[in-house]
Amino acid sequence: MSNDGTLDEAYERLHRTGPEFEGWLSNHGPMAVESMVRRGHARQVHRWLDRYVRRLDELPRGTSPVTADGWRAALGDPHRLGDWLVFFEREVTERPWRTVLETWWPRLLPGIAAGATHGVIRTGHAVHALLDHEDGPRLAELGQALGYWAARWQQVPSAVPSGTAGPASALAAVPRVPDQKAGINHRLGQLADLAGWPTALAALRPATDAGQARDLLAELTTAAALHYLPNAHGSAVMLVHAATAPMAVLRTLPALPRAQWVPSLHAAWAASAAVTAAYTPAAPTPRHSLPTAPESADEVFERAVRHQDEHVIKLADTCLDVHQRTGHPDTLAAVVRATELINEP
């Protein structure tokens, strides 16, 4: 990643804004600019931000401090967002950031659905940046990400994997929620009563050690990226997160104790499966009607930046990592599909 200061400048601009706007929409700015800088598009960052920040709200203020003894009562309370931001600002200032992450990751992980999984996604981007270079703005970004996750902490019904299916087969067998007419909270609320949901989650083969957990997370991210291409018309925006959430967890693993890797897989699998259940359409688009990938992965990311939508940029960032690992052309075609279905800002 470039250390020319562009990312830090972007973080400083964005930290004057809140993690949400228009009541509940997630501020994708920090995630998008981290992807753009790392992929060699630092020159476009500030121009992109000039347009994006107009949509954002001011940084929320705290009302009642979160304490080391009373944090559980504030967990998952969006009205305490300002309090959580102040709390984690202090945490990452006074303690080593890896210690903060090691302490709070297992506390936040059960609520991985927070902000439609944006809490963990923003955290993953922040950790990715810190692993490359540690400085004040990047530490502040981790604090903002963790604060947002804590305030929006939200669980989904889960089950420990105990089957024989690989991630691709397991994801394909996830049942759809019956009512897909409302927002994500309404859809996720149906999972507890969804026939076959516990069985579908348990079908994934288990990881017996940290290395297997990492490998399964990589396979899950690949499966979700490939699932996007024929199913994106179910929700071109929301299905992005079925891939970007496990990618965020995968990128965080190097900063975590290996003892936390297996639980991280379980949470990422539940989150990806939940988004898949909530937004997968009744039938996929036939392959002959879908786009093919350009030959160059760099061209795909450049197309995403030209498109400007933050979800397209995030998906491209994930799909390029998957393509580098697997070489599967449909991972790049998925990004082209996103540019076709998601309206430009």
Image: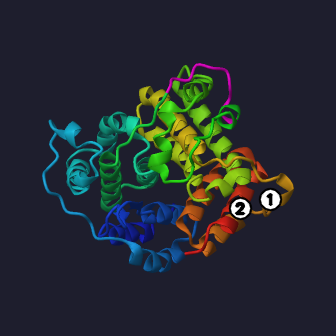
Magenta region, residue range: 159-168
Cα gap from disc 1 to disc 2, whole angstroms: 7 Å
Please name the residue that numbered disc 1 is placed on.
290
Which residue type carries mark 2? Arg
Label disc, if present, on residue 106 of the rendered structure: none
Examine the rendering and report whether any part of residue 39 can be seen.
no
Look at mark 2 in the image and give the residue it sits on.
337
Percent x, y of residue 32: 50, 64
User: Residue 26's image quarter?
Assistant: bottom left
Q: Position of residue 239 (x, y in %)?
A: 59, 52
Q: Which residue is found at the position 32% from the left and 70% from the top? A: 57
In the rendered image, residue 27 lying in the magenta stretch gets the answer no
The one of 88 and 23 positioned closer to us in this rendering: 23
Tags 1 and 2 in contact by the CB under 8 Å rule?
yes
Which residue is painted at 52% across and 27% down in the image?
A: 210
Q: Is residue 226 above or below residue 68?
A: below
The reply to whether the magenta stretch includes residue 162 is yes
Query: What residue is rendered at 63% in x and 35% in y?
Result: 174
In the rendered view, tell whether residue 210 sits above or below residue 241.
Answer: above
| Type of secondary structure dominating the magenta stretch | loop
Give the mark nearest the N terminus, 1 or 2: 1
The amino acid type, in three-letter code, at marker 1 is Leu
Nearest the viewer among 282 and 109 is 282
**Horizontal and vertical percent for residue 118?**
44, 52
